[in-house]
Amino acid sequence: MTFVTRVVFVHGSVGNAASTWSAQRPLEERFECAFLTRGGYPPGPPLERIDFEQQADEVAAELREGDHLVGHSYGGVVSLLAAARRPVLASLVVGEPPCFGVARGNAAVEEFLARFDAFEAAGPREYLEFFLPLVGSAITLRDPLPPALERGARAAMAERTPEQAVIPLDDLGTAPFPKLVVSGAHSAAFDAVCDVLEKRLPAQRAVVPGAGHSLPRAPGYNDALLTFLEGAS
């Protein structure tokens, strides 16, 4: 089969590409799909520090002209930055990127950031017990943690906090490729960020409730993504 369209997927925190995008594997019947695992996540070696700016450079280097770029959560922040570095995309899709800096002053955003700043994780399990409910991801934690999940938690703990990201909204707003922002209708803080991006990019908006922040697992996510990608191809 000859593919004419490539879709590049960039995962968020805790889960790597394989776990984040498992429900998107059927899209390989329609597109050439590249599921990128960010540095620091298994099966790659751990990193002491993970920075969205460096990873945006790494993702941009992987992109080809005409690619569709799809980023979830922290990977959405990376994708926004990478898209500005490589404005030859066919389209950009971001799902609830935690670039809270674009919505500072919003009460829900300020509360979210205050809770995050006040927390100090003693280890991977404590981090997950705090972080997953905060972002709206429901995962039952086994004891002991599966090795891949423990490594994913350690990687998330090494990430530069994403509200520090300076998103080049003006540059992205003038970029010619279409954009889609996806939210899950579960968090006022994430909704506030997505509202700003929808207006400033400007972007189409899809709301896929039912999975909290784990948007790629939400009913309707693949349908919304497929409709957008086919319209943008």
Image (cartoon, rainbow, N blue to C red):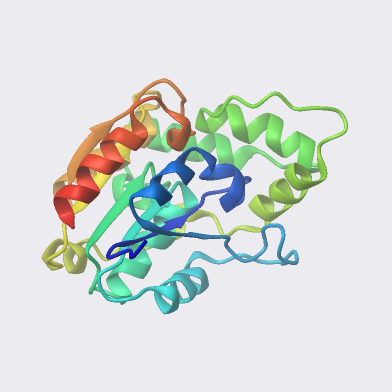
Q: Does residue 99 appear left or right of residue 130 in this picture?
A: left
Q: Does residue 215 appear left or right of residue 178 in this picture?
A: right
In the image shown, does 91 or 129 lie closer to the viewer? 91
**From this viewpoint, which residue is outermost toward the right?**
144
* Residue at (33, 28) in percent of width and height: 220
- Which of the 4 image quarters holds residue 172? bottom left
* Residue at (14, 49) in percent of width and height: 231
Q: Can residue 129 be seen at all in this image of the molecule?
A: yes
21 versus 177 height, above or below? above
| The N terminus - image quarter | bottom left
- Which of the 4 image quarters holds residue 128? top right
Give the total of numbered labels: 0
Q: Can residue 201 be seen at all in this image of the molecule?
A: no
- Which of the 4 image quarters holds residue 169? bottom left
In the image shown, does 66 or 127 lie closer to the viewer? 66
Residue 87 at x, y = what percent?
Answer: 24, 73
Q: Does residue 146 appear left or right of residue 201 in this picture?
A: right
| The C terminus - image quarter | bottom left
37 versus 213 height, above or below? below
* Residue at (16, 63) in percent of width and height: 177
* Residue at (60, 49) in percent of width and height: 18
Residue 132 at x, y = what percent?
Answer: 60, 32
Q: Does residue 107 appear left or right of residue 122 in this picture?
A: left
